[in-house]
């Protein structure tokens, strides 16, 4: 067993020994979803004030709305959430490369077959050159999408990894 | 401003006022990624023992490895993570419906155009009928994928929403 795997087991012992939330229902109590980045420096529960059971939390590279669409639809149509909080962040890895750079790295490290397998389902790594604009574009994408009801409030935010602050963009 | 948006601002005030982690680096310090579900009842940091800055956390409906592939590649190839902890959970919404049910709900609530838009990029909601088998299948998918290097340890777990325990499956 790896050190990381041992750490999961130790955390599980600690966490479950004082766990008191086994009664929570499947649908989020506060009926909203948070979409943010997978970045290691973000703790959505603390930074965005999410109590256990309150909200769905979707995380992917860059907090991409396009990438999250399947999960958003399940959250809204099957589990009745009706508000979206979208949070990208300063210092995001997605600001640091272009699609062709990423595919070149995959080809160098893993070979042409890996690139072909990846491109079959993911032709775009969805990087973005400007942070605030990317927040605006993703909110615009969700508002324009027929998959998201017009009645759903959608706000776009930036989390600052340097200060721990979350500020609204749109 | 909605109550949910006000809650984000209040949390930001609280969190940033005692924030001391502005120095953390972009690449995860412990070089691993956790893939788990968006479910509101999961707090990955506490339940799986993830300190701020240590690991990427990818979350989607059902902790789907197929859906997460773009993010996994970015995590591994651009930010040097080299271990995967995959955690699905008891009581998952993805155990409760089939693809055709979900598309029927989308069509009823949002119309045929919404279904067409969704299917163009997401022809499959990726539900699963059996929990442990779904963990095994996703680990198998990642191990077989040319996109994930053979040297990467991949373990599959189940988090119990009733007890707060995380147990290893594979």
Image (cartoon, coloured by chain):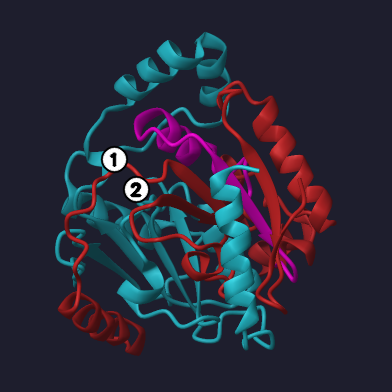
Chain colours: A cyan, B red
**In the rendered structure, are the residues bearing label 1 and label 2 in contact, judged by CB atoms less than 8 Å apart?**
yes
Determine crowd level at label 2: few under 14, some 14-19, many 20+ residues with C-alpha closer than 10 A: many
Tag 2 residue: A62
Residue A40: where, in percent of width, then height?
36, 53
Residues at marks 1 and 2, CA–CA distance in whole angstroms: 6 Å
Question: Is residue A143 in sight in this rendering?
Answer: yes
Q: Is residue B12 magenta?
A: no
Residue drawn at (15%, 59%) of the image: A162
Q: Quadrant of residue B158?
A: bottom right
Residue drawn at (40%, 74%) of the image: A45
Same chain assignment for discs 1 and 2? yes
Question: Is residue B117 in sight in this rendering?
Answer: no
Q: Is residue B125 placed above or below B69 in the rendered structure?
A: below
Residue A137, which numbered label? none
Label 2 SS? loop
Tag 1 residue: A94
């Amino acid at each position: 067993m790896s050190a990381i795997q041992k750490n999961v087991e130790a955390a599980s012992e600690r966490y479950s020994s004082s766990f008191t939330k086994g009664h929570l229902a499947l649908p989020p109590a506060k009926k909203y979803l948070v979409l943010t980045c997978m970045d290691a420096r973000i703790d959505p529960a603390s930074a965005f004030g999410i109590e256990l059971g309150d909200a769905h939390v979707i995380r992917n590279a860059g907090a991409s709305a396009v990438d999250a669409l399947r999960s958003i639809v399940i959250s809204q149509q099957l589990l009745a959430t009706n508000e979206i909080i979208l949070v990208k962040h300063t210092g995001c890895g997605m600001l640091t490369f272009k699609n062709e750079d990423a595919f070149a790295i995959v080809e160098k490290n893993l070979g042409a077959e890996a690139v072909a397998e990846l491109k079959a389902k993911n032709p775009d790594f969805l990087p973005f050159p400007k942070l605030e604009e990317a927040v605006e574009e993703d909110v615009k994408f969700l508002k324009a999408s027929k998959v998201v009801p017009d009645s759903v409030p959608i706000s776009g935010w930036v989390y600052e990894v340097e200060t721990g602050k979350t500020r609204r963009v749109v």
